[in-house]
Image (spheres, rainbow, N blue to C red):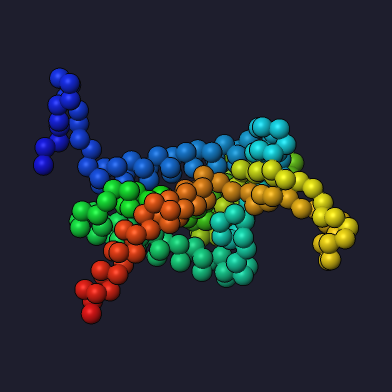
Amino acid sequence: MPLFCVFNGMVIMKVSLQAKVVLLISSILVVDQVSKFWIKLNMTLGQSYNVIGDWFRIHFTENYGMAFGLQFWGEYGKLGLSLFRIIAVILIGFYIASLIKKKMPAGLVLGISLIMAGAIGNIIDSAFYGLIFSESGYATPATFLPPDGGYASFLHGRVVDMFYFPIINTTWPSWVPWLGGDTFIFFRPVFNVADSAITIGVLYLLIFQRNKLFHEEAREVNVEH
């Protein structure tokens, strides 16, 4: 297959699907990690900056568990989730390679690559941030490669989140049972670039690649039988 093509007298390099996958994943990881490093080294826990009014903020928080700050059974759950993520990324990598080999549509492959990039981004936090950063405090930011060592062991680091969109911030009417007078915020979870990549990848697959994805899964089942 030629690596170059000619368009209006210009030589244009044709990029393989493998290269597009690597470029997509690498780009997301760079943006994800640069943003997290900046937050860790320049902001204190709970610190916020308004970007657009009160409904788009950069708000520094950390979580031990799943995407969007969800928790998962304490420290043992944290370790189990980290190991699960690593295994899942390996399996997704093999799946992407098989799709490329079968010449499946680029959209399907790149959608799954988004999910893989997001998973890797949060794995990096869990695996290494406890080793390379000091504890982030409410008064002082973290330091990089502290002399006394990091705040946690391998696979026990905390995931850095920063994007907060409290688009609706109000209280439930007093007449609402159990909730009357309580604060209602939408969208409450704080997330990061990696979480966004996972969400966009899943939505893209479900909306635009659903038929191709399910067709491929059905074909695999038929082949096995």
Q: Residue at x 21, y 73 (%)?
A: 223
Count of all numbered marks drawn on residues in the image: 0
Find residue 10 and report its image quarter: top left
Does residue 220 appear left or right of residue 41 in this picture?
left
Does residue 25 appear left or right of residue 147 in this picture?
left
217 or 130: which is nearer to us?
A: 217
Pick out the residue farthest to the bottom.
Answer: 225
Above or below: residue 50 compared with residue 176: above
Does residue 181 appear left or right of residue 52 in this picture?
right
Residue 147 at least partly seen: no
Find residue 4 and report its image quarter: top left
Pick out the residue farthest to the left.
Answer: 1
Above or below: residue 184 compared with residue 90: above
Q: Residue at x 38, y 45 (%)?
A: 25
Above or below: residue 208 compared with residue 43: below
Residue 28 at least partly seen: yes
Residue 130 drawn at (x, y percent)? 56, 53
* Image quarter (top left, top right, bottom left or bottom right) of the C terminus: bottom left
Pick out the residue farthest to the right.
Answer: 174
Q: Residue at x 59, y 54 (%)?
A: 68
Find residue 37 and report its image quarter: top right
Residue 30 drawn at (x, y percent)? 44, 39
Q: Residue at x 25, y 45 (%)?
A: 17
* Image quarter (top left, top right, bottom left or bottom right) of the N terminus: top left
9 or 60: which is nearer to us?
A: 9
Residue 2 drawn at (x, y percent)? 11, 37
Residue 112 drawn at (x, y percent)? 37, 54
